[in-house]
Amino acid sequence: MKKITIAIDGYSSTGKSTVAKQLAEYLDYIYVDTGAMYRAISLYALQSEILSTNKFDKKALLDTLPNIDIAFIKKDIKSKPEMFLNGTNVETEIRTMYVSDFVSSVAAIPEVRRKLVAIQQQMGLEKGIVMDGRDIGTVVFPKAELKIFMNAKAEVRANRRYKELLEKGEDVTYAAILKNVQDRDLMDTTREDSPLVKAQDAIEIDNSEINQEDQFHIILQLTKDRIAGRV
Ligand code: DC
């Protein structure tokens, strides 16, 4: 069967990665969560004290950028890929609020984006890939056969993220998460380099009132149509 490239972009906590993973599993495609890559670089900057609440030494980050190694590694063929930063598994740590609060400032740096976009494009050379992020349909794979742009009301997204983090045992408040979601929306859509925008040829889905299963079937149908060349 013909393999295509599927780009899933959208606002934070819209469930991009959930549907991207479902699709990749169903189609036996590679799944890449590009947010994890920006999160790993941010974690590196925080750990090495290049970045903190009061300071961001961008030059130090750029100087050390070539030495930051990030890789998705699977424990075995069946398990999901996990993010490794310079050889250490950071899959859990990169999802904490501590990292979420800083990631948009790191993702705004053009040199960081250039490094990660090059890796992402390399991963997609053979197609058969589902990639989620903010600039996949606009910058990474502008020729992707299927582009989805996901949105939902900020309160709905914050509530989903709140439940997720509570389940993981994080000590968070709904108000702090809503603020993080809104701050990231603003930074991601207004940054100069590759801001979050819907690609002209992307299909927009607002999932404020669509459940995960229905959403999966909507996107799967779109995928099948593209593979068959029906649209
Ligand atoms: O998808 P996520 O919430 O894990 O992404 C974390 C941050 O990384 C997000 O606030 C913006 C940034 N990001 C980006 O700028 N470009 C991407 N392709 C993916 C994520």
Image (cartoon, grey):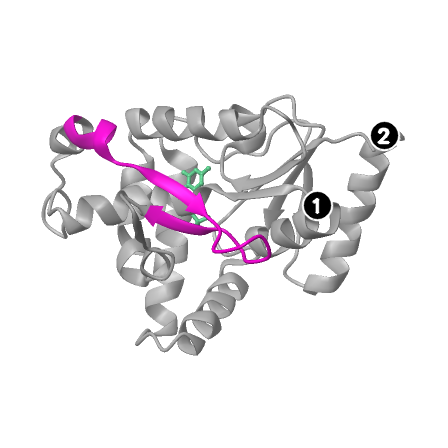
In terms of sequence position, does the residue under pointer 2 or pointer 1 come before the other? 1
Q: Outermost residue toward the front?
A: 76
Quadrant housing the N terminus = top right
Q: Is residue 175 above or below residue 91?
A: below
Secondary structure state at the residue bearing disc 2:
loop
* Residue at (33, 62) in percent of width and height: 96
**Disc marking residue 231:** 2
Residue 192 in view in this figure: no
**Disc marking residue 28:** 1
Residue 230: percent from the left, percent from the top? 89, 30
Quadrant assignment for ligand 1:
top left
Q: Start and end of the magenta stretch? A: 63-84
- Marks 2 and 1: which is nearer the front? 1
**Residue nearer the viewer, 24 or 174:** 24
Determine if the magenta segment contains residue 82: yes
Q: How many neighbours does mark 1 have within 10 angstroms: few (below 14), some (14-19), or many (20 or more)?
A: few
Residue 73 in view in this figure: yes
* Residue at (68, 52) in percent of width and height: 25
